Amino acid sequence: MALADNSVEIEEINRDLLKAGEMIKIRQTMTRRFFKTVAPHWDQIKKQVLGNFDLNSIILKKISFQGGISDLGCGTGELIEQLSGRTPFKLIGIDSSPEMLEQARARLLGKTNTELRLGELEYLPMKNREIHTAVMNMVLHHISQPELPLLEAFRILEPGGRFILSDFDLHDQTRIRELMGGSWSGFEKEKIKTWLVETGFKLHHIDSFPVNQGLTINIFTAEKPKA
């Protein structure tokens, strides 16, 4: 009787896993369609949501410029463009949207130290320990399984490398989610802190900034410990 009960339980678990996998694929497809539509207008949408808050300038101040830098979920390449004039090191932008990368290529035309790669943040097209600094700027709320990009960021960083992550604090504004897209309405600070520590990062700072629309953006600065 116990064997039969176990068999039924295993079948139910397998069905649940299958359904979860299907939902993740559906969300990924919806995200791709969303960015295909908004890519030409993405910078204006961000301005509408964030107002005059200059998030890129804050992130630039947190980068140590000791080696190569990767913008994970680079979108239209706005941050990489600003980085390109400040460092001779290689800059790698990665995004899952061909349409967003098309905008980035146009923006970065003539920038010799930049490279753009098409790929998912959950499975980065990068080698182990390839980069010194990784930035994940207002991207995590688009990812169905947020822990996976954090594991990948840890993998691609050199020991002693820096990880900078920004995203909305948890909010209940449906209109913002419609404008910016995403699987999540931001995250509680403690949730991301827990994910980072469990991944293996040493968390240095959490900075919080009130922005437009009554929203708050949290910026996490962490380090991959040296072996």
Image: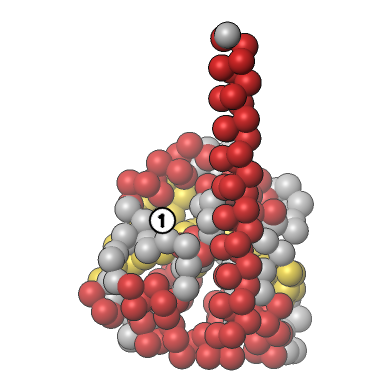
Q: What amino acid is at disc 1? A: Phe
Q: Is residue 197 visible?
A: yes
Q: Position of residue 188 (x, y in %)?
A: 32, 53
Q: Position of residue 105 (x, y in %)?
A: 71, 85
**Residue bearing the label numbered 1:** 220
Q: Quadrant of the N terminus?
A: top right
Front position in the image: 132 or 197: 197
Front position in the image: 176 or 132: 176
Element type where label 1 sits in the image: strand
Residue at image coords 56%, 63%:
27
Residue at image coords 58%, 70%:
30
Front position in the image: 8 or 213: 8
Q: Is residue 64 visible?
A: no
Q: Quadrant of residue 186?
A: bottom left
Q: Quadrant of the C terminus?
A: top right
Residue density around tag 1, few if under 14, some if 14–19, many if 20 or more, within 10 Å = many
Residue at image coords 57%, 32%:
12
Position of residue 118 relative to residue 111, above or below, is: above
Position of residue 72 relative to residue 9, above or below, is: below
Q: Residue furthest left?
A: 214
Residue at image coords 37%, 63%:
185
Q: Position of residue 207 (x, y in %)?
A: 32, 60
Q: How many marks?
A: 1
Lateral position of residue 187 relative to residue 37, left or right:
left
Q: Position of residue 92 (x, y in %)?
A: 69, 68
Front position in the image: 108 or 112: 108
The image's colour scheme reads secondary structure
Q: Quadrant of residue 103?
A: bottom right
